[in-house]
Amino acid sequence: MPVAGALCAAVLALAALGGAGAQAQQLSPAYYDGSCPHVYDTVRRVIQEARAADPRILASLLRLHFHDCFVNGCDGSLLLDETPTMRSEKAARPNNGSARGFPVVDDIKAALENACPGVVSCADILALAAEISVELAGGPYWRVMLGRRDGMAANFDGAQDLPNPKETLGELKRKFADLGLDDTDFVALQGAHTFGRARCVSIQDRLYNFSNTERPDPTLDQAYLAVLRERCPAAAAASDSSERLNDLDPTTPDTFDNHYYANIQTNRGLLRSDQAMLSAPEEGAESTAPIVSRFADGQADFFQSFVTAMIKMGNIAPLTGGIGEVRRNCRVVN
């Protein structure tokens, strides 16, 4: 694609900067070239097979990388199952019943263990799966920085504080800034909502009782509000329809593109956190609204910024060298 050269240049520039400190500098896109040369093709093959059975899996795998990196850094801790002495991050409120794709990660790990046992970490699998998922959905390609090792423990309490789409824009921006991600990174990473789905329970308050007003969110386009209310009736919170799925991007729901930002410009952002970037000046939208407009006007600009933000996010507190381990099974420590 036309921006591929620029994206690769961004990878190398960020690698030189080492956005998360000395440990990040040890990451390299060539890390497995000698020890597991077909790692990328193996991960891609398993994801393509999974996608044939589940079109949602691409967005789900990208989300796993987000939710892993925002807790303990990018160390694969999200993948650990519960034990008698450790609560799993999977059980935390933002992940329970929402984070998905773990069996696909298991399949990727099994294929890699067959090809090159004990070599590729689960944390790196999540990073590769995120890039491949974006690319398969029509988004940009970039060379993934690799060489992370796996953490030895989950952080349930940390996972409880993951960014929440019902939080204020100011709070979300702070959580990203605390991890070294600026406003451009934040708006670009929110662009991951250009594909995937959200449950009715996630938007119920926007449709019927926004900020305890017993009225809908006034920023919602009226026609879009009517569509969403039909899909998510008022009693949905107490019924099976609370789990009904809605396209995060109603225009191109399974394609990674910049339509997400155009939707926000027409007040069709599904989640509160989406629309707030444009429509909540009292929460700091004066710094994010111009970025939303810029990305809506230029897909190449969005892609470039998304790649930069993903590399920065992937450099959050990686375990390298002799720290951590390479798990044989992503669900348990060795």
Image (cartoon, rainbow, N blue to C red):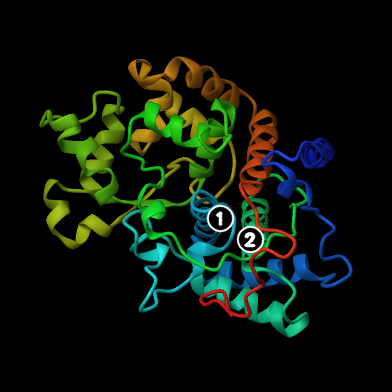
What quarter of the picture does the N terminus occupy? Answer: top right
Relative vertical location of residue 29 with respect to residue 167 in this rendering, above or below? below
158 on left or right of 40: left
164 or 50: which is nearer to us? 164
Name above or below for residue 85 compared with residue 314.
Answer: below
| Place of residue 5 in the rendered image (x, y in percent of width and height, measured from the top left) | 85, 39
* Residue at 16% across, 37% down: 208
The answer to which of 307 and 177 lies nearer the viewer is: 177
The residue singled out by tag 2 in the image is 129
In the displayed structure, 257 sits above or below 119; it is: above
Q: Earlier in the sequence, mark 1 or mark 2?
A: 1
Residue at image mark 1: 65
Q: Is residue 46 left or right of residue 106?
A: right
Give the left or right position of residue 140, taking residue 152 as reference: right
Residue 186 screen position, x and y as percent: 53, 33
Q: Amino acid at mark 1?
A: His
Quarter of the view holding residue 168? top left
Kindly identify the amino acid type of the residue bearing the numbered disc 2. Answer: Ala
Identified at 50% across, 28% down, the residue is 262
Q: In the displayed orientation, state which residue is furthest to the front.
A: 322
Say which residue appears at 22% left-offset and 48% top-offset. 232
Q: CA distance from mark 1 to mark 2?
A: 8 Å
Mark 1 touching mark 2, by CB under 8 A?
A: yes
The residue located at (68%, 80%) in the rendering is 111
